[in-house]
Amino acid sequence: ALAAAAEAEARECAAAEARIRGADASRLRGEEEDYDGLVIDVAVYGLLPPAGRAAQSWLNELCRALGPQATSAAASEQRDQLLRARGLVDVSVVLQSLVEKGALSLPAGSKAGLPAFHRPQLCAPSAIDSDGVATASPLSALGESLPPLDVLAGTAAAPVDAPPHARIAEAVELIPADAQMRLFVAYRLRGEVRRAHYDDEDPVSLGAPSVDV
């Protein structure tokens, strides 16, 4: 319950920061699109599988699920559910707001303390293996049975059709404190679709040579 309450508070703070930066991000996105600059399409931080060939198809699926085409209220709710189930935070807006003249740079060090970032504490059991490493399990249906954070935190009643309380506890996994966090960014630069995948402590450089996957 404590982890769920902390997670709910962190996600609300991140969402509030994204709303504050939304206007700047939208303006900068338009300016970058006008001259084929740096446009952030998908950016997520948290429990991501290690970069490599095995993760490529999973990241393709993630981009389709989280891309800017998902704009309806239902799609937005599904995105939020997917992010919670995977132990991920959407940081697309804040990264776009930090773009300057076609480039984005973040210093080395954990990203968890940056605006709109936070370290997720909970995920669906299938999102993490016994060693605390993110899996590349299929995204379809993942998180459909994940209870809302306010239910997990004990601040709201479970829906009438919810599973028994014992099963609610089994529907989530506590992410170990030493689990590796990562940042994934799908972006466009000079009209080309590109991707970058960083370990948490890595410096970030987009609009310059970067780690593409």
Image (spheres, rainbow, N blue to C red):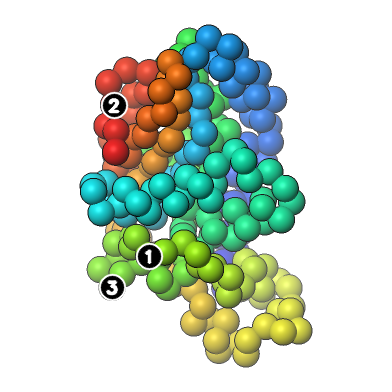
Label 2: how many residues lie within 10 Å, few (<14), some (14-19) or many (20+)? some
Q: Which mark is residue 210?
A: 2
- As rendered, which of 33 and 11 lies closer to the eye? 33
At label 1, which amino acid type do we have? Ser
Residue assigned mark 3: 130
Q: Is residue 185 above or below residue 72?
A: above
At label 2, which amino acid type do we have? Ser
**Secondary structure beneath disc 3?**
loop
Q: Quadrant of residue 16?
A: top right
Q: Is residue 97 above or below residue 199?
A: above
Q: Position of residue 137 (x, y in %)?
A: 37, 65
Q: How far is mark 3 from mark 1, CA to CA?
A: 14 Å
Q: Is residue 135 above or below residue 91?
A: below
Choose the circle earlier in sequence order: 3 or 1: 3
- As rendered, which of 69 and 18 lies closer to the eye? 69
Residue 28 seen in render: no
Residue at 47% from the left image edge and 45% from the top image edge: 63
Q: Position of residue 201 (x, y in %)?
A: 29, 39
At label 3, which amino acid type do we have? Ser
Residue assigned mark 1: 137
**Secondary structure beneath disc 1?**
loop
Say if mark 3 contacts mark 2, CB within 8 Å: no
Question: Which-is-in-front pick, marks 2 and 1?
Answer: 1
Q: How far is mark 2 from mark 1, CA to CA?
A: 26 Å
Q: How far is mark 3 from mark 2, CA to CA?
A: 31 Å
For the C terminus, the quadrant is top left
Q: Position of residue 46 (x, y in %)?
A: 42, 50
Q: Which mark is residue 146?
A: none
Label 1: how many residues lie within 10 Å, few (<14), some (14-19) or many (20+)? some
Residue at 34% from the left image edge and 29% from the top image edge: 204
